[in-house]
Structure formats: structure tokens, C-alpha cells
Amino acid sequence: MRVSTSQIYTIATLGMTQAQSAVTKTQEQMATGKKVLSPADDPVAATAILRFNQELARTEQYGKNINIAETNLNLEESTIQTIVKLGQRMGELAVKAGNTAIYTSSDYKALAAEVDTRISELVNLQNTRNASGQYIFAGYKGDTKPFVGDVGGNYSYLGDEGQLRLQASTSVTVAVSDSGKKLFVDIPSGHNTFNTSASASNKSEPPAIISVGEVIDQDEFNRLYPEDLQITFSKNGSAVNFTVTEKSTGKILLPTQLYVAGSDIEVAGAKFKVMGHPFPGQPAIPANLPFGVTPATALGVGDQFGIRIGGKTEYFTMSTPIAAGDSAALAAELNSGAAVPPALPTGNAAKLASLGITITAAGIQSAGGQNIEVVNGASGPGATAIMGTDGTRSVNLPFTFTPTDFSSTPATFQLEVNGKVESFTLNQNITGVSPNTLTEIFNNPANYPKLTRLGLTVTDQGIISNNNSRVTIKGGNANLDLLTGLNTRGTGTSSTVGALIEPGDTFFVESTDKQGLLTTLTRFSEAMKNVKDTPESKAELAKIVAKTITNLKNVETNLTSVQGELGSRLNTLESSKELNLDITLSTQTALKGLEGLDYADATIKLSMQSLVLSAAQQSFAKVSQLTLFTYL
């Protein structure tokens, strides 16, 4: 068989290439110390090696997580320990302040100055940041400063209740933060207390603030608990007033009071201040339902009728007979149970207070401007017979009446109630003197049916919605504006539904059985600043000192409990660190068994492969020189 020169070269090249590849691979194995350089070398081993490397990478990350967690927890632990010491110092100061027989008001002001300094220190501690600049007590809102105060002594928590966690091993996650709300705000109080706040919708600029306040009559406040209070500001002429009601029921606890900035407000055992210039809104339009008949028939014991205002109805049952025409006796019966503040009304007077109305011999008045309706009771004469009317008489859109002549330039406009619209045309000289009064013109045959369909009554004082609905007057002109004192052009003017044309600022006193550390210290400081050198004042201070001591002990108990949790977490991290070390060692051992190179075997193998390569090269050199001419 003939072998061509090209075949000789091809066979030789292939053999040398394979031998060279074998030598190179063995050299790479010896250089890296690994016998599996690619999945093709050993697919099964390569899969296991990949899995082991991933396990090592995860374990390495767990180690980094543990280092971060330990740093955060150590920072939190040291911060809490500092706060515990601060609280203990404040407890010592409270015990000292309890010596009311020794200290004077000047001494107490000096003690209060130290408390104020400690409060500033405490706020800084509660706003501690870690090495990454994150607030450690803000929950998930690490970029948000958690504790912010105002000049009224109120501190708001702006973080959330989230708890950051890190993976310490395959099966272990550890909390590395605690919410400031849990640590410093939601502290069980030794007594029922309250928190104060301003409504987010308040309009005063700069914002008016409410003080942190204090409980001055625990028994009376316990009767209010867990109900909350609402302080609503209103305007009457140039005067700014406020009313205190139960938040959920609307029951009036402190009727319309003149506001004096910074003066104490005392109600239901609570004392607080509103400071600044609260927005009073626009003044209420007083509603008045006069006794048209006083009463037409005698009322007997057990006769009943109801009064409805703002959707709320109270029923009144006669406990004494009322003679026909004796409106004074009727008013006295409906006011039975009245009490001098701060004592709370009872009986019929309590029902009037919950409705926010007053009754005199002249009739029923709602200073808040809500519509009043008298409804029939279960027994006795009808409401019309008792009161002379059973409709409503609250003015929703009041007129500033100015006589205006529409005889030469008629005005067309619309009234809208709950989506229903009716058009009206005025073409008279409206003088305000009969027969040219607004009442007579709007009750003429052309207009009265339209008012009835809308549920409205119009008087010279304004437009009345008989069911307390929103009323809009629109599409008018300048002459109609002059007549009513309202903007009637374009989209016009709408009434508001409720007691006020425009509500004023609102503040809240919210009952709670918890009291934050900052609130406790602020109340302690305020009490010492305001104490007077009288037995009564020092007795009140002694009560607050006792509450302060109790609440500071509760704070210490809460923080000590959290310190125990922190220690447990650090122990868990230490155990996880040891577990991860064991996992790393076992994984590395298994990995070495799969990919580790036996150098003695590799050395022998390299020598053999080198010999094969050398032989292939020498053989090729000899064979490549052979020709037929050699044998001639």
C-alpha cells in the first residue's frame, strides 16, 4: 500500500497536536491545582463543583450579613443602654422632685432645666444613625428622621413599625433593628392618659399647635376613657371661639368658649393649651326655630316628641304637665338636668348638649348653624301642635339684602340642589317692603312649585334647605349679586353641608393607655415649670411626679426586655457564624476531593505525555526525510 507524502504529514501533525494538548492540559492542571478544568473533563464532578462553589459564595455572604448585623445590633444595644441610664437619672430627679415640702418654685425651674437638656439629648439618641446614614429606629423608613417635636412639647414618630432582618444562614434570619414606636412610644402607662395632635387639614399659618397637656383629674378622665376629644375653632364676628366635643359621638362637653391664646383648656379631667392663631373658619349662621305656638295644647306626663339636627335625633318625654301657652315651662322641662361646668349635664339637658342646641322660651337655637327639625314622638300631640312648625329654619345661603330694581333689566339664575336645577327670573322692583319682599316673590305661584321640588325655602334672610343639603346659586348677573350679596355669576356660590360655612382648625385629644418616654419627661418638666409655692399646686405636682416615676419604671422594663432580645439575637449570630464556618470547611473538603489534583500522579502523567510528544516529533523528523532516492 502506498502512503502519500500528504498523509504522512497529516498523521504526524495530528499525533503531535494531540500529544501537545495532553501535555498542555496536564501543565494547566498542575498550575491551578485542579484536575477538572471544564465540564467536559468530568460532567458529573463539574455539576457538584458548581453546587459547592455556590454554597461557599452563599456562606461568604452570610458572613458579611452577620458582620453588618452585629454592627447594627451593637450600636442599638449601646444606644439603648445610654437611654436606660438617662431614664434612671430622670427617675432619681423625679424622686428628688417629690420632696415638695423642701423645694420652691425656683428650685423646680432649675430641675426642669436639666430635664429639658436631657430631653434634647434623648431626641438625638432616638434619632441615632448607623454607618450608612440610616436612622436605626425608623423601621423601614431609614431615610426619615423618626422623632420630630414642636414648641408645644409634642413629639411625632414619623417612622413605621417595620423591623429589618438579615439572613445569617440557610435557615436563620435575625432582626437587626427595632421600631422606635415599639421602644419609646408604645410604653404601657400606669394610668389612662392622652396624646394631643393637630388635624393635617388645619389652615393657620404659621400652624397653631396644641400642648402635650396632662391629666388633672384622673377619676373624671377615666369616665371619658376610651373616648377621644375634638377641639373645633369657629368665628363669631371678630371673636374666635372653640367647642370641645366627643370625637365619635359629637356630644358637646364644652360649649362655645372664647379663645385666649395660651390659656389652659380644662375638660373631662384633661388640661392642655392651644397656642398660636388657629384659623377660625367663617362664622356659623345661627339656626333658629321659634315656638310659633306656645304650645297650642296642654302637654301631659309621658307626651313625647323628637328634635333632629344633623341627622341625629333625640326624643324628649314630658315628666310634668305643661299648660297650653306656657312656653317658659316647656323650655324649663327641656332644660331639666342642666349643670354648672365642669359638671356634666344629665337628663333632657344632656340630650340638648349632645345635639349642640339650646332652648329658651323663644324657641330652639343652633349656634352652629345646622338645620333643626321637630319630629313627632311615639305619643302625645303632633310636632306642629307643640312647636307651631315641623320644618327647618336654618339659613344655608345667607343674603346681605340690598333692594334692587329688576323691572327694566330682568335677571335669570339657577338654584341647584343634589343635581336638580330650577331656573328663576326676577323682573320686579324688590324693595323689601310688602308686597315686594323676597319671601313673597319666591312664594308666588310661578316660583313656589320650583322651590318645593328642590326642597328649599327662601326668605329675606337667605335660602334654606329643608333637608340640610348643599345649595348652589349660579348663572346670575351683577344686579343679582347686589341684591343677595353673593357671587351668583358663572358657577356661583355653594353652601356647605354642616354646622359651619367654612370649618376652622381642629385639634384632637386621643385617649390611650400608653405614654411615650418623651411625653413623660415633657409633662414632668412642664409641671415643675408651672408649680407655685402653694400647698394645692405642690399637691398636683406630687401626683404628676408619682405618675412620672411609674412611667419611667415602665420604660426601663420595656427597654430591658428589648436588651434581652438583642443579646439573644447576638447569640444567634454567633451560633450562625460557627455553623457557617463548619459548612465552609466541610464544603471545601468535599470540593477539594472533587477537583483537587494529585501532583505525584500528574507529574508521572506529564513525563509520559512529554515522552510521547518527543517521540512523535522525532519520528516525524525521520519519516519526513525518507524518499525513494534514498534506496537507489
Image: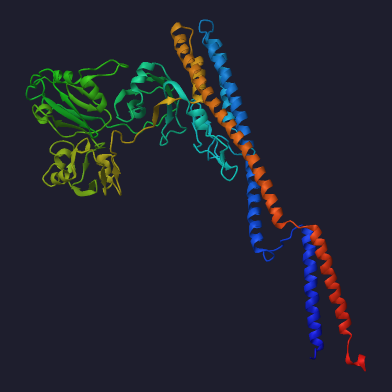
Of 269 and 310, the residue lying toward us:
269
Which residue is pictured at 26% across the width and 36% down the height?
400
Q: Indicate the position of residue 430 as horizontal and vertical percent values.
A: 18, 41
- Is the residue 162 above or below the residue 378 in the image? below
Q: How many marks?
A: 0
Q: How is the image coloured?
A: rainbow
Residue 62, quarter of picture: top right
Which residue is pictured at 77% across the width and 73% down the height?
18
Residue 563, quarter of picture: top right
State the quadrant of the C terminus: bottom right
- Is the residue 273 above or below the residue 490 in the image? above
Left or right, 158 with respect to 510, comes to right
Left or right, 604 with respect to 187, comes to right
Q: Indicate the position of residue 269 as horizontal and vertical percent values.
A: 37, 18
Can residue 412 be seen? no
State the quadrant of the N terminus: bottom right
Of 468 and 425, the residue lying toward us:
468
Residue 258, quarter of picture: top left
Which residue is pictured at 79% across the width and 81% down the height?
11
Can residue 338 be seen? yes
Q: Indicate the position of residue 229 as horizontal and vertical percent values.
A: 36, 27
Which residue is pictured at 27% across the width and 43% down the height?
481
Left or right, 341 with respect to 142, comes to left
